[in-house]
Image (tube, rainbow, N blue to C red):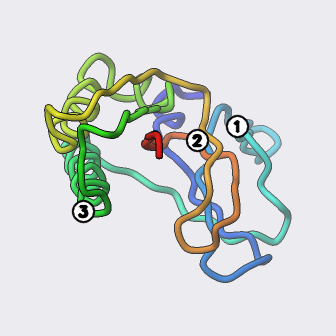
Amino acid sequence: SDPENLRFTMRVKPNVLAGHEYNRAVIAIDEKNGAIKFAGDVPQGSRSQLLRTTLHGLVEAAEEAGSKVLEEIHNPEDYFAVLISCVGRKLIHGDRIVAEVEAASDALGKKMAKIGFYSHGEICPHMNSGISELHNHTMTMFLLNEH
């Protein structure tokens, strides 16, 4: 497989539930057999779309996500943020991907404690359907606090 082909992410929309979708990383292309290998299941009959973005687009999205999180809480100093980015994003953008994490961290502000790491995919609920699913090439953030 041409390494350039592995830079794409596939958005998968299974026919199970309207509004539910997830991302799959393309990990290999078998041109001889006309097959694509993904990092996770892609159910037969699903609709799919190749995705492509720029580092600038990822940074803007991370900043927007951090800002949206802050809109939902009252006292940022009472929370601890965990930022998880798929290692596939790092493979695509190299060391420049740290800009995405910095943008999310800056948006969350200096009062909130934070930690982050790379993973091989994230399991989280979809914001529309609420169904938890394995996602590839995504960045996930969640907050913890004590009540």
Q: Nearer the viewer, mark 2 or mark 3?
A: 3
Q: Residue at x 19, y 38 (%)?
A: 103
Q: Is residue 24 left or right of residue 139?
A: right
Q: In this view, does 7 lie to the left or right of 31?
A: left
SS at circle 2 = loop
Task: Specify the quadrant of the image occupied by residue 65.
Answer: bottom left
x and y percentages locating residue 127 in the rendered image = 52, 66
x and y percentages locating residue 4 in the rendered image = 46, 32
Lower sequence index among marks 3 and 1 = 1
- The amino acid type, in three-letter code, at marker 3 is Glu
Task: Specify the quadrant of the image occupied by residue 106.
Answer: top left
Q: Confirm or deny contact between disc 2 and disc 1 (CB under 8 A).
A: yes
**Residue position for label 2:** 136
Q: Residue at x 79, y 49 (%)?
A: 41
Q: Which residue is drawn at 63% across and 73% down?
A: 129
x and y percentages locating residue 100 in the rendered image = 26, 35
Lower sequence index among marks 2 and 3 = 3
Kindly identify which numbered label has been placed on residue 71.
3
In front of the other: 147 or 116: 147
Image quadrant for the N terminus? top right
x and y percentages locating residue 35 in the rendered image = 77, 45
SS at circle 1 = loop
- The amino acid type, in three-letter code, at marker 2 is Asn
Lower sequence index among marks 2 and 1 = 1
Badge 1, how many Cα within 10 Å: few under 14, some, many 20+? some
- Measure the alpha-carbon separation of dots 2 and 3: 26 Å
**Residue position for label 1:** 39
- The amino acid type, in three-letter code, at marker 1 is Ala
Q: Confirm or deny contact between disc 3 and disc 1 (CB under 8 A).
A: no
- Measure the alpha-carbon separation of dots 2 and 1: 7 Å
Badge 2, how many Cα within 10 Å: few under 14, some, many 20+? many
In front of the other: 103 or 91: 103
